[in-house]
Amino acid sequence: MDSEQLKRSSQRWMSAALAAFVEGPESYDFAVHHAGIATEHLLKAYLAGIHPALIVDGRHFDSLLHATGLGSQATPLTKVKTIGLAEAHERVFKLLPKKIPIDKKGLEPLADARNGVAHSAIHDTTQAEAVFTICLRLVDPVLEELKVDPNGYWGPYLVLHHKLVEEQVRQERVTAEALLVKARAMFEQRFGHMSGTEREVVLAAITSKPMISMSKEAPKECPACGSQGWVAGELHFSSAGEDGPDEIFLVPYGFHCAACDLEVSSKLLVHFGDLNEDLLLDDDPYDYIDDEPPVDEDIFRGR
């Protein structure tokens, strides 16, 4: 439960993962497995740096005793139960919503690959590069938050890291442009024959409500057709201090436009202008919580 130990462990597992990756498809099972463990340990390093209790299974009392310095009254440390990769990611994502580029759904290929190898010796070799890219993009902002030198962490594989990330970004930009072209063609097909007045009436009707079934939504202009679309995301609370009001932001992880059918996933939002920017909501933050104080992000700053 020591942050420094978890950092060192993460770096060793990542080096082993990259060493296996460069060996080719016959070693991809080791690569994705080790990369998953490396990522989990780094996420836990961040959480443990705030408090060790953040990485233990809250249902296991002996583990909580160890995490709070009362290990002498608990079972041996080797029996401590901690959270897994998915829950570690969920907790870090909640604490660093503006910095972690991989959401819950985006994590699935990495988690599935690691678990598939660990439990069933099953993995899809054709997805190894994609899995690694998810891992790299998730690790980078955590390294920055922990003030870990990336040169030391990636070591001789730093150039490979850059190439994998650059290739993924290139592919995402191509995908984003293709989505825009398709959406614009759809919009023209649907509304190109209408008069301006008729089009305004129809668009007002079909774009007035969000089409995404997620937690919260807010209106946003569609980058493809200019109609009103909707971004969906997680709520994030912030306190301006004792003399200032609480604020509530929507941290986007999806967009949909009913007019042209443009649908953008979380990992592509960054390629669509300001769709990826947090939205300050006018709502009262306390309308979204059940008589509980909002989470104050300021307590995590500088950690």
Image: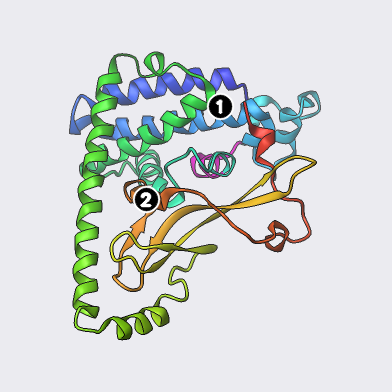
Is residue 196 in the magenta section? Answer: no
Q: On the image, numbered disc 2 is attached to which residue?
A: 269
Indicate the position of residue 170 as horizontal and vertical percent values.
22, 40
Q: Residues within 10 Å of mark 1 (few under 14, many from 20)?
A: many
Q: On the image, numbered disc 1 is attached to which residue?
A: 45
Task: Tell me the tag on residue 291.
Answer: none
**Is 33 in front, or is 223?**
223
Helix, strand or loop for disc 1: helix
- From the viewer's perspective, tell me whether residue 236 is left or right of residue 193: right
**Is 8 in front, or is 145?**
145
Distance, label 2 to label 1, CA atoms, is: 28 Å
Quarter assignment of residue 244: top right
- From the viewer's perspective, tell me whether residue 74 is left or right of residue 167: right
Which residue range is magenta in the image?
A: 82-90
- From the viewer's perspective, tell me whether residue 69 is left or right of residue 126: right
Helix, strand or loop for disc 2: helix
Quadrant (top left, top right, bottom left, bottom right) of the N terminus:
top right
What's the residue at 35%, 80% (across, down)?
200
Quadrant (top left, top right, bottom left, bottom right) of the C terminus:
top right
Indicate the position of residue 248 as horizontal and vertical percent values.
63, 52
The image shows residue 51, relative to residue 92, as above or below, that is above
Q: What secondary structure is the stretch in magenta mostly built from?
A: helix
What's the residue at 51%, 49% (across, down)?
278
Quarter assignment of residue 73: top right
Q: Residues within 10 Å of mark 2 (few under 14, many from 20)?
A: many
Indicate the position of residue 192 as horizontal and vertical percent values.
20, 78
